Image (spheres, rainbow, N blue to C red):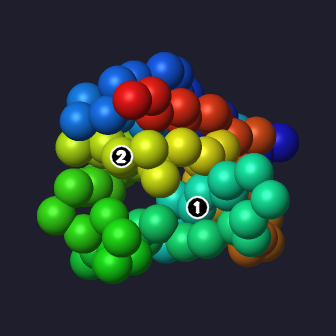
């Protein structure tokens, strides 16, 4: 079965950097758009960044200029490079990918999340 697994979260001081990874595995024919989302405690989940299958990217205003989303098609992996982290970036980060499997079925899959904690 298709799975998404995020990794790379952790504790970092404000101003520091982290790189998150979202790796897809299973009977994957193709991966379309992928998005990184985050959810802070008590706050609705929000979209952070997206990358299309053709590698066009979009970012939330709050992370523009600090975060970079990229993808490695050969590895079925999408990355989120987070620089100049702020306290407000503290959240659980999730990736969502639109995946077509070998049967032709297309679904949106979510990973289990990875926690990012930014300390002062």
Residue 109 or 84: which is nearer the viewer?
84
The residue under label 2 is: 86
Position of residue 30 measured from the top left corner of the image (x, y, whole percent): 53, 62
Camera-nearest label, 2 or 1? 2
- Count residues near mark 2 (Cα–Cα under 10 Å), then give few for <14, some for 14-19, many for 20+: many
Query: Which residue is situated farthest in the front direction here?
Result: 120
Mark 2 vs mark 1, CA separation in Å: 16 Å
Mark 1 = which residue?
37
Q: Is residue 26 above or below residue 62?
A: above
Q: Secondary structure at mark 2?
A: loop
Q: Position of residue 67 (x, y in %)?
A: 27, 55
Image coordinates for residue 12, horizontal then vertical, percent: 39, 23
Q: Could you say whether the residue bearing mark 1 is in a helix, strand or loop? A: strand
Q: In this rendering, would 76 be left or right of 4? A: left
Question: Residue furthest toward the left?
Answer: 65
The answer to which of 88 and 28 lies nearer the viewer is 88
Give the numbered dot on residue 60.
none
- Quarter of the image where the N terminus is located: top right
Q: Quadrant of the C terminus?
A: top left
Q: Is residue 87 visible?
A: yes
- First-in-chain label (2 vs 1): 1
Q: Is residue 70 above or below residue 62?
A: above
Instruction: Classify 37 as above or below 57.
Output: above
Disc 1 crowd rating (10 Å Cα; few below 14, some 14-19, many 20+) is many
Residue most toward the top?
11
| 27 left or right, relative to 85 | right
Name the spot of residue 44 as percent of width and height, x first: 74, 70
- The structure residue drawn at horizontal position 63% and vertical position 34%, both measured from the top left corner, is 114
Q: Residue at x 21, y 55 (%)?
A: 66
| Labels 2 & 1 near each other (Cβ < 8 A) | no
Residue at the image position 39 percent from the left and 76 percent from the top: 60
């Amino acid at each position: 079965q298709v799975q998404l697994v995020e990794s790379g979260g952790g504790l970092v001081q404000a101003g520091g950097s982290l790189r998150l990874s979202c790796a897809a595995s299973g009977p994957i024919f193709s991966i379309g758009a992928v998005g990184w989302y985050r959810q802070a405690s008590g706050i609705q989940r929000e979209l952070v960044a997206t990358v299309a299958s053709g590698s066009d990217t979009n970012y939330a205003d709050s992370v523009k200029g600090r975060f970079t989303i990229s993808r490695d098609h050969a590895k079925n992996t999408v990355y989120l490079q987070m620089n100049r982290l702020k306290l407000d970036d503290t959240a659980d980060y999730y990736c969502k990918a639109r995946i077509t499997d070998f049967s032709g079925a297309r679904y949106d899959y979510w990973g289990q999340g990875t926690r990012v904690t930014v300390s002062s």
